């Protein structure tokens, strides 16, 4: 988790990108296919992605093969 500033200026706690991607992969059957595809495309096209962190999260959720 990390702390960010909301558009209204308040502090909020959010999950990092890698955790969100793992959650989307874990719950793929419950996720809208368009949301799944868009999230994957945007994450893997991003220069800010952290593949090592992604695999660490995947290991914690036992979804390494899916990632």
Image: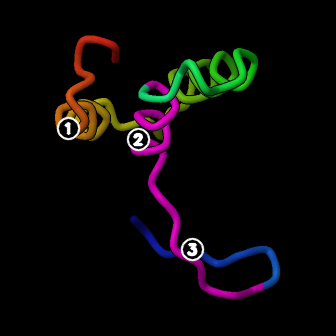
Q: Secondary structure at mark 3?
A: strand
Q: Residue at x 60, y 85 (%)?
A: 11
Q: Earlier in the sequence, mark 3 or mark 1?
A: 3
Residue 44 is left or right of residue 52, and the answer is right
Residue 39 included in the magenta stretch of the image: no
Q: Residue furthest right?
A: 8
Q: Position of residue 37 (x, y in %)?
A: 65, 16
Q: Residues within 10 Å of mark 1 (few under 14, many from 20)?
A: some
Q: Residues within 10 Å of mark 3 (few under 14, many from 20)?
A: few
Q: Position of residue 30 (x, y in %)?
A: 61, 26
Vertically, is 58 above or below 20? above
Range shown magenta: 9-25
Q: Earlier in the sequence, mark 2 or mark 3?
A: 3
Residue 34 is left or right of residue 67, and the answer is right
Q: Which residue is mark 3?
A: 4
Distance from disc 2 to disc 3, alpha carbons, whole Å, reads 16 Å
Q: Residue at x 52, y 31 (%)?
A: 24
Quadrant of the drawing holding the N terminus: bottom left
Q: Which residue is mark 2?
A: 18
């Amino acid at each position: 988790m990390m702390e960010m500033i909301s558009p209204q200026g308040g502090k909020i706690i959010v999950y990092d990108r890698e955790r969100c991607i793992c959650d989307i992969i874990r719950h793929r059957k419950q996720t809208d296919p368009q949301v799944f595809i868009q999230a994957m495309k945007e994450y893997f096209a991003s220069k800010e992605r952290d593949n090592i962190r992604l695999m660490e999260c995947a290991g914690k959720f036992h979804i390494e093969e899916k990632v």
